[in-house]
Amino acid sequence: MRKLLGILGVLALLRGAACLVTGFTALDVGPVRPPGFLDGLEICAGITLLVPGFAPFAVAESRKSG
């Protein structure tokens, strides 16, 4: 369960960072490209993904192993 939460957190953080890169640099290539409905909202989407992206790490740390 801890590994799954860690993977979900990393994916959310990477996707949020990619949206911020797209918003600030207008880089629209490869996996950095956000979905079409987010045109013009890349920075808001990036922040929205980054903030809850830390939550799985907090939950994984609070769970006791064993």
Image (tube, rainbow, N blue to C red):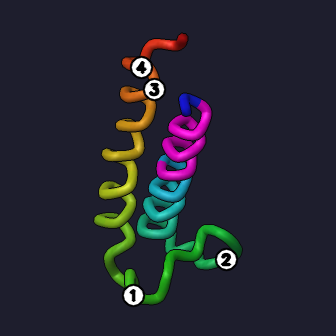
**What secondary structure predominates along the stretch shown in magenta?**
helix
The magenta segment: 3-12
Q: Which residue is mark 2?
A: 29
Q: Quadrant of residue 27?
A: bottom right
Q: Position of residue 49 (x, y in %)?
A: 38, 55
**Along the horizontal axis of the image, is 44 left or right of 28?**
left
Element assignment for label 3: helix
Mark 4–mark 2 CB contact (< 8 Å): no
Element assignment for label 2: loop
What's the residue type where badge 2 is placed?
Val
Q: Earlier in the sequence, mark 1 or mark 2?
A: 2
Q: Which residue is mark 3?
A: 60
Mark 4–mark 3 CB contact (< 8 Å): yes
Q: Report, in whole angstroms, how far the alpha carbon at label 4 lies from the one at label 2.
A: 38 Å
What's the residue type where badge 4 is placed?
Arg
Q: Quadrant of residue 2?
A: top right
Q: Which residue is mark 4?
A: 63
Element assignment for label 4: loop
